[in-house]
Each structure stands twice: as structure tokens, then as C-alpha cells.
Image: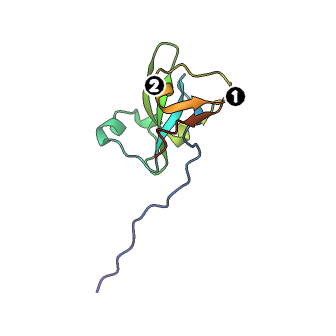
């Protein structure tokens, strides 16, 4: 009889929720969270393409962002360790935001009722 040890990783609570406006702690972009993975859920090829000295751990939440920088708008996949709250109060310009979110009078982004399933 052999003993088996459970290799289930400890689940962490995501620091940022849907609609949170965040910015990257190193690179000059910001965005809005539209989905969260509790742990890394992308390809190994994607992960290995990140330079080793800045490659994030896989055992943390990863966020899907409608992101923007000075030149463009895009979708980003970013580890929790590389995100900080964006407290600028500036509205985001990403064209995909209006499809998923609405912004209230206080500037908070909320999921559109048609998206909240």
C-alpha cells in the first residue's frame, strides 16, 4: 500500500476583481480586468517567451485585461505580482470596454447586465 500526497495547489483569492482598473508595475500600460484565472492558464510557449529574470510564478492569479498604452489598445494577460491599482481616475479609451462594462457617476466600471451571467 502506498501513500499518495495531494499536490493540489493552495488557492489564493484574487486581489483585483472584474472592472478593476490596474496598471503594470514595470511596463507603461494600464487596463481593466475582464476575466481572472486563479493560476496560470496560458501556453508554456507564451510563458517561456518571457525573459527569465522577469518571468512570473505560475501559482498566482493571472488577469485578462483590456489594455492600452500611449500607442495602442490590446488584450493583455498579466500576473498578479505585476499589477498595481491605477488610482489616476482617468477614463480608459479601449474600444472594447463599452461592450463589457458601463461606468457609473463615481467612475467605477461595472459589468453590463447582459455580460453578467
Front residue (pair 13, 9): 13
- Write down the residue under mark 2: 96
- Quarter holding the N terminus is bottom left
Marks 1 and 2 close (CB-CB < 8 Å): no
Q: Quadrant of residue 20?
A: top right
Is residue 25 shown to the viewer in this render?
A: no
Q: Secondary structure at mark 1?
A: loop
Which numbered disc covers residue 60?
none
- Write down the residue under mark 1: 105
Write the residue at 29% across / 38% down.
Answer: 45
Tell me the CA gap for discs 1 and 2: 20 Å
The residue mark sitting in front, 1 or 2, is 1
Left or right: 21 in relation to 49: right
Write the residue at 31% across / 42% down.
Answer: 44
Looking at this rendering, what residue extends furthest in the front direction?
114
Q: Secondary structure at mark 2?
A: loop
Q: Earlier in the sequence, mark 1 or mark 2?
A: 2
Amino acid at each position: 500500500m502506498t501513500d499518495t500526497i495531494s499536490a493540489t495547489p493552495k488557492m489564493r483569492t484574487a486581489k483585483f476583481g472584474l472592472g478593476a482598473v490596474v496598471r503594470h508595475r514595470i511596463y507603461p500600460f494600464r487596463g481593466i480586468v475582464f476575466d481572472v484565472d486563479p493560476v496560470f492558464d496560458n501556453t508554456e510557449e507564451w510563458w517561456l517567451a518571457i525573459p527569465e529574470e522577469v518571468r512570473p510564478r505560475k501559482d498566482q492569479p493571472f488577469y485578462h485585461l483590456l489594455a492600452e498604452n500611449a500607442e495602442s489598445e490590446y488584450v493583455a494577460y498579466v500576473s498578479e505580482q505585476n499589477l498595481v491599482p491605477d488610482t489616476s481616475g482617468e477614463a480608459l479609451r479601449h474600444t472594447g470596454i463599452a461592450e463589457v462594462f458601463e461606468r457609473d457617476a463615481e467612475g467605477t466600471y461595472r459589468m453590463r447586465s447582459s455580460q453578467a451571467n
